Image: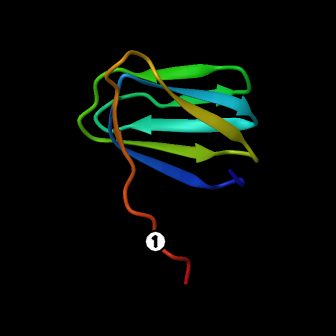
Amino acid sequence: MERGGLLPLEQARDVRIVCLEGTLWLTEQDRPTDVVLEAGASHTVNANAGRTLVQAMSRARLAVEAVDARPELSFPPLRKAA
C-alpha cells in the first residue's frame, strides 16, 4: 500500500492483520483505542460487527490471515478512480 492508502474491512472477525513492511494504523468501530503496527507485528480482530480501517502510515505491505477455520470478512466494492 502506498502511504495514506486505506483498506476498509467490513464485519471482520477472527482475522489477523500482519504488517510485513512499513507502518500500519488500524481502527475498529466501537473500540476505544487504535493500533499501530510496525513490520513484523500483528493484530487480531476478534469480534467486530462493524468496520475496521487499515491505513498505511508509510509505504507498507500487509497480510490478512484467518485465525481459525471460519473467519468472517468482506471488502466493500472497489470504486474506479476519477
In the image: residue 21, left or right of residue 49? right
Coordinates of residue 41 in the picture (x, y in percent): 65, 20
Q: Nearer the viewer, residue 4 or 64?
A: 64
Looking at the rendered structure, the number of numbered marks drawn on it comes to 1
User: Quick check: 32 above or below 10?
Assistant: above
> Element at badge 1?
loop
Residue at 71%, 20% in the rendered image:
40
Q: Left or right of 80: which side holds 46?
A: left
Q: Residue shown at 62%/55% (left/top)?
A: 5
In the picture, measured across the screen, residue 14 lies left or right of residue 42, that is left
Indicate the amino acid at tag 1.
Arg
In percent of width and height, residue 39 lies at: 74, 26
| Residue 82 drawn above or below residue 45 | below
According to the image, label 1 marks what residue? 79
Q: Residue at x 45, y 65 (%)?
A: 78
User: Where, quadrant-wise, is the C terminus in this rendering?
Assistant: bottom right
Quadrant of residue 17 within the rendered picture: top right
Q: Is residue 14 left or right of residue 47?
A: right
Percent x, y of residue 49: 23, 35
Residue at the (66%, 30%) spot, across then down: 19
